[in-house]
Image (cartoon, grey):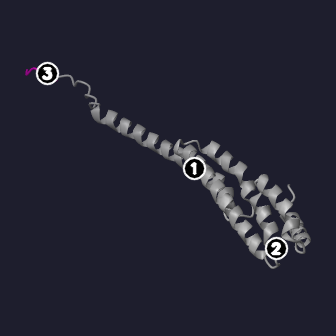
Amino acid sequence: IYPDFRPLAAEIRTRRNESLAGKSLEQVQPIVDKAVSEQRFGDAIDALKQLRGGGDAEAAGRQIASIEAKVDAEYKVLTEAGKKLIDGKQYAQAAEQYRGAAPRFRNTRHYKTVLNKPENLMEMAQAEVNAQRAREARAKAAETDAALAKAEPPKPPPVPELKPEPKP
């Protein structure tokens, strides 16, 4: 139903990278600063990677390391907040938090982890629901078994006494 935007996104990235290839660090710096301020870390890293082969390679490498440190710090904050929600068994809220944060980590080393986390959390929630149902079913079965064990077997109906027949 929905078109596949991956080829279009790849083409746009390729065009952007080609346009950045001949530029200097000073020309790319505003793009990098804007991407970092908008927390689009992957775009900033991609822009700086285009400068690795030029004369600004060392400065670009330092900036990439700085941005990756920011990415790691953001990821740590995200995972700590997510862990608090998970510990409180608020899986849906944690999944939404990761879903909302995924675009910030696009094209970074944490992107796949953040992107897949909501699905994993929903599976955890479903597994917990299934485990709870199984515990309840076992408890109910044990309760039924205990009730049956306590119940006395029904007494047979009284058999009328047979009187001997008189002898003639």
Q: Amino acid at mark 2?
A: Leu
- Which residue lies under the disc numbered 3? 163
Which range is magenta? 162-168
- Which residue lies under the disc numbered 2? 51
User: For numbered disc 1, what is the local secondary structure?
Assistant: helix
**x%, y% of residue 120?**
61, 54
Q: Residues within 10 Å of mark 1 (few under 14, many from 20)?
A: few
Q: Residues within 10 Å of mark 3 (few under 14, many from 20)?
A: few
Query: Residue at left 63%, top 51%?
Result: 78
- Which residue lies under the disc numbered 1? 80
Earlier residue among tags 2 and 1: 2
Query: Residue at left 49%, top 43%?
Result: 132
User: For numbered disc 3, what is the local secondary structure?
Assistant: loop
**x%, y% of residue 125?**
57, 47
Q: Residue farthest to the left? A: 167
Q: Are marks 1 and 3 in contact (CB under 8 Å)?
A: no
